[in-house]
Amino acid sequence: LPTVLLIGRPNVGKSALFNRLIRRREALVYNTPNDHVTRDIREGIAKLGDLRFKVLDSAGLEAEASSGSVLGRTAEMTANVLRRCNFALFLIDARDGLQPMDLDVGKWLRKHVPGIKIIMVMNKAESLDDGFGSVISAASEARTLGFGDPIALSAETGLGMNDLYEVLRPLLEEHMLQVVDEATDESNEDCESSEQEESKLPLQLAFVGRPNVGKSTLLNAILQEDRVLVGPEAGLTRDSIRVEFEFEGRTIYMVDTAGWLQRTKSEKGASSLSIVQSRKNLMRAHVVALVLDGQEVSKARKSMTHDEVVIARRAIEEGRGLVVIVNKMDLLEERLYDRVVKAVPEEIQTIIPQVTGIPVVFVSALEGKGRIDVIQQVIETYKKWCLRLSTARLNRWLRKVMSRHSWKDLSAQPKVKYFTQVKARPPTFVAFVSGKTRLSDTDLRFLTRSLKEDFDMGGIPVRILQRAVV
Ligand code: GDP
């Protein structure tokens, strides 16, 4: 399990938060003997929504810190504990605002454990309910510590725990991927073939896009049956409709997520419900098919509206495969047709620079043109998304990449000792980096780009995490 340490000056409410997180479950208290000093650290399994993680309460480590300085032996022990942790929640007291001792803790953290991800927490925020203004001013004060936006919460009342959840969820998920299987290269080869089976599992495909771009028509065209209601009124298909479909022996579940973009409409009720539903569908999908209206594209200065950009980015950020479909191409005369075919892929590349080669398919749902291309691109994307490479193969690749590229050009002169894939769907890798070096963003981009080129993983989000090896 990932481990999270609660840290902060005395009395900010570390134990209260600890108790809330473990919710009456048994806390394990263990000692950290260090010469003649013994300090207690409480450890428990935190439950926050569907998240589970190990939480450590550093309250027992702070005796000497309360003298006003967090240096000395306690600090050394804290640092040792922190190095075993994956994240730290740095608590301050929302009522008191920033205190000199908070600044000390901040400085100390930056100096001694620079690599660890720190999340600021403003506890006791229930006392700020006199008005939102005070929360904002406390938050801007907290931001000066340099650890980003604080989460305002109350360990006493539970206020803001959902915000903590939202922040921790992506971090913990990412971390879980790093739990590397110690399997040998040989068993990893087996893994490669068995994981390929994954790509034969049912594919969840979500159609998203503004009302009237032709999602339902396209769905019907693919199914070649009138199973989805099609009509000219915006927002007619309120509910997300899921249909099952077989293509070349493969099962595909298609969801037409109507309403995803209707939040600007004033009417509440049904449409806002379907937005929630659509969002869920997007997250559940393996591949997201974003449908654009070709005629609108040809008229507008930009191919995509703000909402469409948000969806495209969101899909990639959430680790989904993305296929962009430009519909209603039958309405375009040749000159415009050519312009659209050129403009859309270019614009997508600038919108999502981190992923090259996102497939774009030009279709006419009404005439049934391009329906097979859509399905083929979706399946292609899905296969890449499921790709799993053996550690042996990856490390052969790593050696080649290292010799091919002059690492001198790169900032960190890193030494990547070992490279392995920890997860597919989407492909996620860990680079084990020697000593204290960390790969810079440039290095990571280079590795990601090479990996994608050499293993044909264009168009899907690929993640590389890094871990230090001694
Ligand atoms: P949805 O809201 O995205 O599901 O859009 P619909 O599938 O309901 O389509 C909206 C309107 O666009 C309907 O009147 C369709 O007939 C029309 N339409 C859909 N696809 C095409 C196409 O490829 N070409 C043309 N000319 N019209 C289309």
Image (spheres, rainbow, N blue to C red):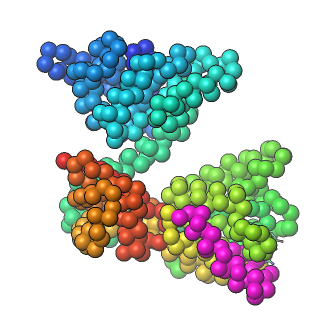
Magenta region includes residue 263:
no
Q: Residue pushed farthest right?
A: 233
Magenta region includes residue 331:
yes
Residue 159, quarter of picture: top right
Image coords of residue 303 (percent x, y): 70, 69
Q: Is residue 227 visible?
A: no
| Depicted 108 relative to depicted 265: above or below | above
Image coords of residue 86 (percent x, y): 35, 39
**How many numbered tags mark residues here?**
0
Q: Which residues are magenta?
A: 326-353
Q: Residue pushed farthest bottom?
A: 334
Q: Residue at x 27, y 58 (%)?
A: 413
Q: Residue at x 67, y 54 (%)?
A: 278
Horizontally, residue 400 falls left or right of residue 352, namely: left
Q: Main secondary structure of the magenta part?
A: helix
Between 457 and 355, the one lying in front of the other is 355
| Depicted 273 relative to depicted 202: above or below | above
Residue 311, quarter of picture: bottom right
Image coords of residue 378 (percent x, y): 56, 72
Q: Residue at x 34, y 50 (%)?
A: 178
Quarter of the image where the N terminus is located:
top left
Horizontally, residue 154 falls left or right of residue 218, namely: left
Between 364 and 293, the one lying in front of the other is 293
Q: Is residue 170 visible?
A: yes
